[in-house]
Image: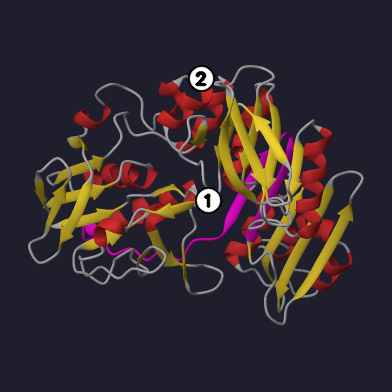
Amino acid sequence: MDYVILGAGPAGVIAAETLRKADPAGSVTVVGDEPEPPYSRMAIPYLLIEDIGEDGTYLRHGEGHYADLGIEVRRDRATAVSPAERTVALAGGASLSYDRLLIATGSRAAVPPIPGMDLPGVETCWTLEDARKIAARMHPGARVVLMGAGFIGCIVLQALAARRLEVTVVEMAERMLPRMMDETGGEMIARWCEGQGVAVRTGAEVTGIEAAGDGLRLSLASGEALEVELVICATGVRPNIGFLDASGVALDAGVLVDHHLATNVDGVYAAGDVAQGPDFSTGGQAIHAIQPTAAEHGRIAALNMAGQRTHYRGSLAMNVLNTLGLVSSSFGLWMGADGGQRAVAVDAAGFKYLRLEFQDDVLVGALALGLTRHVGVIRGLIQTRIRLGPWKERLIADPHGIMAAYLECAPGGAARG
């Protein structure tokens, strides 16, 4: 059996290792288009902080790791897939034949169509090459604009602050972390950042960037201009699916897959940031571009590719983030379910916030800010769909009783009313 994996990120690497265990005799080839060994993009901020070197970002250590497992890692890029011939065309001119194909090509940084985005000193923060360019301009006191205050932007912010740069965050939405925090949480995070010396502009739009002496000048829709040495664009990512346009593989925002991570085309699977798969909370299909989902996708897709029928329950929207020392988390339907109920506890001065969302007597979503002790319990209650019974009303009265609710309602607990 010939297995070909397009993409050398966490989903692709874990799939390759799982295939090797599931089918010791099969041929496993991983195709990645970056010159470095397979690495984790989530480790790049730690590289920028200088907590690790470049080799610290690598997913696996040991010079012969992949060769020792009989996994071939090729430096190339897929340009087309032909399911009728079961072949993949590569940019280098070669063609690979497959019996089973995994599309794990991940995402690329999304760059808004703003004049000046191609100027030197305007960088994305998605690859190791991006990190090298940013690091070259990260001298203490350098003025930096961070475009985007989403999950990726706030991870990058941690590195910029640690290197003592003068940072201004510019976010088009009306709050920071608009896709994982509500207005209350977003306002708290912005206020916390400002208290740490970071300037925050929400509801702000960059209209242009131009060279200005040795630096750059950003123009905002408000008329304000910012003079900086570095601009980092963290305005989101887009799945790498363009090479599949003529393949017959069903596409939407990403590659559509079922509960076995299989596409509509026989022998073709998808995993990771590129896969639009089952959503645990809604029952629909969604892209959850987080590393735990990519890892689980890779494992389950590989088992199915090797003939070990394995059902995937669906991914949970889940983010845990440390923003300059303030930890925030969101899970599931944190924005609420139709007809559901909500419990809220706010300590604005103490930067603590807890929001629980219920559907009937089941916890289906949550936000937590400045509270880390019970994050695992919240996730467990959502993923196991434990019925809370009378505990739901107790939690609506006092959300901080979540641990006690878990201990009584979880399997093996007292289950007392």
Quadrant for the C terminus, please. Answer: bottom right
Label of residue 3 in the image: none
Query: Left or right: where does residue 187 sit relative to residue 75?
Result: right
Is residue 411 in view from this perspective? no
Task: Name which residue type carries label 2.
Answer: Ala
- Residue at horizontal 26 percent and vertical 54 percent from the top: 102
- Residue at horizontal 10 percent and vertical 43 percent from the top: 93
Query: Left or right: where does residue 197 sit relative to residue 165?
Result: right
Mark 2: few/some/many CA within 10 Å (<14, 14-19, 20+): few
* Gap in angstroms between the C-alphas marked 1 and 2: 23 Å
Q: Position of residue 137 (x, y in %)?
A: 55, 21
Task: Name which residue type carries label 1.
Answer: Gly
| Numbered disc in front, either 1 or 2 | 2
Q: Which residue is mark 2?
A: 136
- Residue at horizontal 19 percent and vertical 56 percent from the top: 80
Query: Left or right: where does residue 125 sit relative to residue 12?
Result: right
Query: Left or right: where does residue 301 sit relative to residue 211?
Result: left
Q: Which residue is mark 1?
A: 236
**Residue 318 vs residue 253, the one in the foreground:** 253
Magenta range: 304-331
* SS of the residue under disc 1: loop
Task: Indicate the quadrant where residue 345 lies.
Answer: bottom right
Residue 314 lies in the magenta-colored region: yes
Q: Position of residue 173 (x, y in %)?
A: 68, 56
